[in-house]
Image (tube, helix red, strand yellow):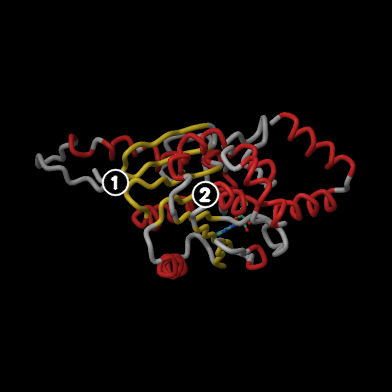
Amino acid sequence: MYCMEKFKYWMQKRLNGDQGYKLLHFMSRNRIAGFCIGLFYGRNLSKLAILNHTDKHKVGRHEYMKHYQMHLSRFKYKNNNLLEIGVGGYERPDRGGCSLRMWKRYFVYSNIYSIDIYDKSPQEERRIKIFKGSQNDYEFLNKVIDYIKKPIDIIIDDGSHINEHVIQSFKFLFPKLNAGGVYVVEDSQTSYREDYGGNSIDLESPSTLMNFFKKFPDYINHKEILSNNGRNSILYYDIGSIHFYHNLIFIHKKNN
Ligand SMILES: C[S@@+](CC[C@H](N)C(=O)[O-])C[C@H]1O[C@@H](n2cnc3c(N)ncnc32)[C@H](O)[C@@H]1O
């Protein structure tokens, strides 16, 4: 792993930013290179992340992949529907799609769907379908769900990271997730950033995403919670478990 990061760093030093990006992008989109990457490293998500040039695995910054490996390996050989919010590359249509190709190579029998506020259609491939729209636009999300038709097994929110959007997307999309499915929220540190609608002073602020998800352990135990009239009447989501990591949250859905 270390060698691979060294090689990437060595290459990036010799090429200017745009050349380095284009080379890695070409490698990750090239069918033969992609096939070889999948063949040799298909079971190791951290290596796939580096080789597909996503920022989901960066030592000292985001080390998300070891958690993904632990939570998602049981889906590897299943026919899943995966939806990731955020293609990457922002307004540039020729950029991004790195994590989508990584998922495609890891989940060899799955369909990968994604949404982005910008047009990312050039990043589409066989088994990768992208929709243009915003993660907080319920009419648009409804069309996406109608298109996918089948329930979704894995949802990853790596979009705007605006607190309000993260909560709105969860409220709409979590009910569409299969029981047994997993919902992931990346970059949850924006909960503490004012420019994303977060709050770093009042850690109980009701509008932040961390406070939204901090209530979830109560939903796991909702049967044991009595309201004033002695009946369980709290609103809850079907939560099997919730896992908080550095800047990353996994929520497992279970009919409870
Ligand atoms: C961090 S990048 C995604 C990186 C990609 N998932 C990866 O791991 O390679 C965030 C993406 O979210 C998109 N985005 C920003 N606001 C959005 C919104 N409201 N709805 C959907 N996508 C949005 C941006 O255009 C950008 O391409």
Instruction: Point out residue 256 in the picture as x, y percentages from the top left corner.
Output: 24, 43
The amino acid on which the numbered mark 1 sits, given as a three-letter code, is Asp
> Considering depth in this image, is 9 or 38 the residue closer to the camera?
38
Instruction: Point out residue 64 in the picture as x, y percentages from the top left corner.
Output: 57, 37
Q: Secondary structure at mark 2?
A: loop
Instruction: Point out the quarter of the image occupied by ligand 1.
Output: bottom right
Which disc number belongs to residue 107? Answer: 2
Which disc number belongs to residue 238? Answer: 1
> Considering depth in this image, is 9 or 195 the residue closer to the camera?
9
Q: Residue at x 72, y 57 (%)?
A: 30
Quick check: is the Cβ at mark 2 less than 8 Å away from ligand 1?
A: no
Instruction: Point out residue 25 in the picture as x, y percentages from the top left corner.
Output: 74, 53
Task: Single out the residue that lies furthest toward the left.
Answer: 229
Gap between marks 2 and 1 measured at Cα: 25 Å
Q: Residue at x 38, y 62 (%)?
A: 150
Does 72 sit above or below residue 99? above
Front label number (2 vs 1) = 2
